[in-house]
Amino acid sequence: MSQFSLEGVFNEYLERKPIFKNKQALTISYTPEDIPHRQDQITQLGVVLATCLRSERPSNVFVYGSTGTGKTLVTQYVANALKKKSKELNINLKILYVNCKMKRVSDTEYRLLAYLCELGGVAIAPTGLATEQVYKAFFNSVSNYDGVLIIILDEIDELVSKVGDTILYNLTRINQDFSKCKLSFVGISNNLSFSNELDARVKSSLYEEELIFPPYNAVQLADILRSRAEISLYPDRIEKGVIEKCAALSAQEHGDVRKALDMLRVAGELAERKGIEKISEKLVDLAQSRIDRDRIFDAVKTQPKQSKIILYTIISCFEKESQTMLTGDIYDKYICLCKKNNIKNITQRRLSDIISELDMLGIINAKVISKGRYGRTREISLAIPLSTASKIKKSIDEEFSF
DNA sequence: AGTCCACAGGAAGGGCAGGCGA
DNA sequence: TCGCCTGCCCTTCCTGTGGACT
């Protein structure tokens, strides 16, 4: 019986007219042929790095802008163009790209160097060597290379927060030690205050050139979406105003193109699933709440045990009485829950920090208020719909079975 | 003007688990 | 393999704070 009904589901799906012709074009991993509204940045980066086409060392460049402003895309676009041109001109150029956010790539000095060696074609044992030896291996491979080497360090702030800036100091010093290889760096970051964390010497060598990526506005986002939609969607499957709506909603969130693409993709997926012929503005709303919900669910999933228990307590309070709560009230309820379930409780000091964390995640709103003689506290309310909160509570309940 | 409440939140450090590296 | 290091979660101790109350 179940096999029969599943067959029906498959057939029904296949009978429907598809919405996507190339869904990949609505993801961030897709590299388009041209990048709208980033001509200035492409030109600026191109001008700086073009030096390598005369076999000279380009200046180090530091690229920054908030999430989804096209930093990585533009850098890779320019890098690919340079590779192509250098091949034509028969010039030795190597470009290594490292995403420092990736696990097991740049958590330690050792891993980053080993990864760079590997990209450069030198195999290094994943563990066991002294860091100094790995440096040596990297220096050796670099010194033997007669040409220009550009290392792109994406999310460079992650690298510095994990391993410090010593590695950048050591790497940027290489040019003083080896004459044959011309090495330069492109650092990409979305943390504007990142430069303050750096040692003055590192900063001066890394920031030879600076490139800023401003956020996209709604009109620019709509342009980008339109060009991606042309590639990814069948033309008659999207209602008028949908692209503008996705653009406007994402423009409110720091002009993040990723968010805009996600919204359009999820709206399309919902339309396909529901068997709706055209992507409508209503589906965009639905897609947005789905994306927000998924984001919150993911954030909750990675929280430590006590955070989940406290969130459970807070949601329980709001299910019973939909008013605002104070830190003290929540702590009392939390203690009761711990006693009832034989769980070791944390102190109010720690609870205070967890409330701040939940506030930062956008799950609750916690505003510091003063009640005069009756003390200073935080007034807490839910920042998400109660229906979503209840689902979160249910998932926490399944984990701990209160 | 001074007191007092109920915390906020900074600083320092403990305990533990897991990963690193010699 | 095992000592060391690091990060995370947490505690303890402390000072600071805004406004109602006296």
Image (cartoon, coloured by chain):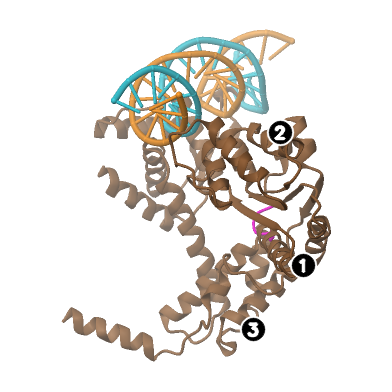
Chain colours: A brown, B orange, C cyan
Of mark 3 and mark 2, the one earlier in the sequence is: 2
Tag shown at residue A198: 2
Is residue A254 in view from this perspective?
no
Quick one: label 1, few (<14), some, or many (20+) residues within 10 Å? Answer: few
1 vs 2, front mark: 1
Residue type marked 1: Leu
| Residue A225 included in the magenta stretch of the image | no
Residue ID for mark 3: A240
**Quadrant, the N terminus of chain A:** bottom left
3 vs 2, front mark: 2
- In the image, the segment drawn in magenta is A65-70
- What is the x, y in percent for residue A121? 55, 52
Q: Does A338 sit left or right of A220 as displayed? A: left
Chain of the residue displaying label 2: A
Residue type marked 3: Lys
Helix, strand or loop at label 2? It is loop
